[in-house]
Amino acid sequence: MSTLISSRQRVLAGGALVLVVWFLLADPALAHEQQVIRFGSFLGGFTHPVLGLDHFLAMVSVGIVSAMLGGGAIWVIPGLFVVMMTVGGLLGRFDLGLGMGIIEAGIGVSVVLLGAAIAADRALPVKAVMGAVVFFGAFHGYAHGVEIPSVARPGLYILGFLSGTIIIHLLGVLIGEIAKRYARGRIVLRILGGLSAVIGVLFLAGAL
């Protein structure tokens, strides 16, 4: 019992630390150019998904959904998202003229749908989830690619935001795996999923 409690305490402490660091570092007014100047190209790219609430919520949700699906999906779904982010990032780097209004709307919709999927806590068709991940991963990647600052080294910046994405996915998988073990854990996930969906709606409405 003491080991179980100790494990829970470590998980809660880790989660609290992540949230504290996020709120301390997040600065809505911080431009991407300033991030690169402050942190360098790699860390500037790394902080893009980590400090961007819409990106952060979507990527954590991908990890949680993959954990809820279980089996090979735990790694296939996040891996597919990262691959499509890479493709989208390269396309965004060359800016195909897709308006940022459309891109931001796609990102907002991804937050809403992923949050709703977690809140529903229902068995989802793996192929449907994979299709959504392909679509939304490309949107997120394109947004990152378009927003690569002129002062950044593109290769390092792309590597940075992909690394940040992978870590956020792993955090989501960890949260999902732990929550699945406890009845109340799944209830907490449903609440968090609902809150995430609401935040996505606020993004779409331009309130955030």
Image (cartoon, helix red, strand yellow):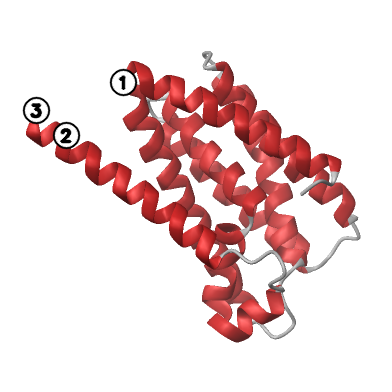
Say few, some or many: other residues with alpha carbon within 10 Å of mark 1 (under 14 / 14 to 19 / 20 or more). few
Is tag 1's residue or tag 2's residue first in the polypeptide sequence?
2
Looking at the picture, how far across and down is residue 119, in whole percent? 57, 22
Rendered residue at 81%/46% (across/down):
207
Looking at the picture, how far across and down is residue 77, in whole percent? 51, 36
Looking at the picture, how far across and down is residue 41, in whole percent? 58, 80
Q: Is residue 180 above or below residue 167?
A: above
Q: Quadrant of residue 183?
A: top left
Rendered residue at 60%/73% (across/down):
157
Disc number placed over residue 5 in the picture, else none: 2
Work out how far the residue at label 3 is from the one at label 1, CA to CA, in angstroms: 15 Å
**Label pair 3/1, CB-CB below 8 angstroms:** no
Q: Amino acid at mark 3?
A: Met
Under circle 2, the secondary element is helix
Q: Amino acid at mark 2?
A: Ile
Q: Amino acid at mark 1?
A: Tyr
Q: Is residue 21 above or below residue 195?
A: below
Rendered residue at 46%/52% (across/down):
19
- Which quarter shows the N terminus? top left
Q: Which residue is mark 3?
A: 1
- The reply, left or right, for residue 25 in relation to residue 142 is left
Q: Which residue is mark 1?
A: 182
Disc number placed over residue 47 in the picture, else none: none
Say few, some or many: other residues with alpha carbon within 10 Å of mark 2 (under 14 / 14 to 19 / 20 or more). few
Let me know if residue 167 appears in the view: no
Is tag 3's residue or tag 1's residue first in the polypeptide sequence?
3
Under circle 3, the secondary element is loop
Say few, some or many: other residues with alpha carbon within 10 Å of mark 3 (under 14 / 14 to 19 / 20 or more). few
Work out how far the residue at label 1 is from the one at label 2, CA to CA, in angstroms: 13 Å
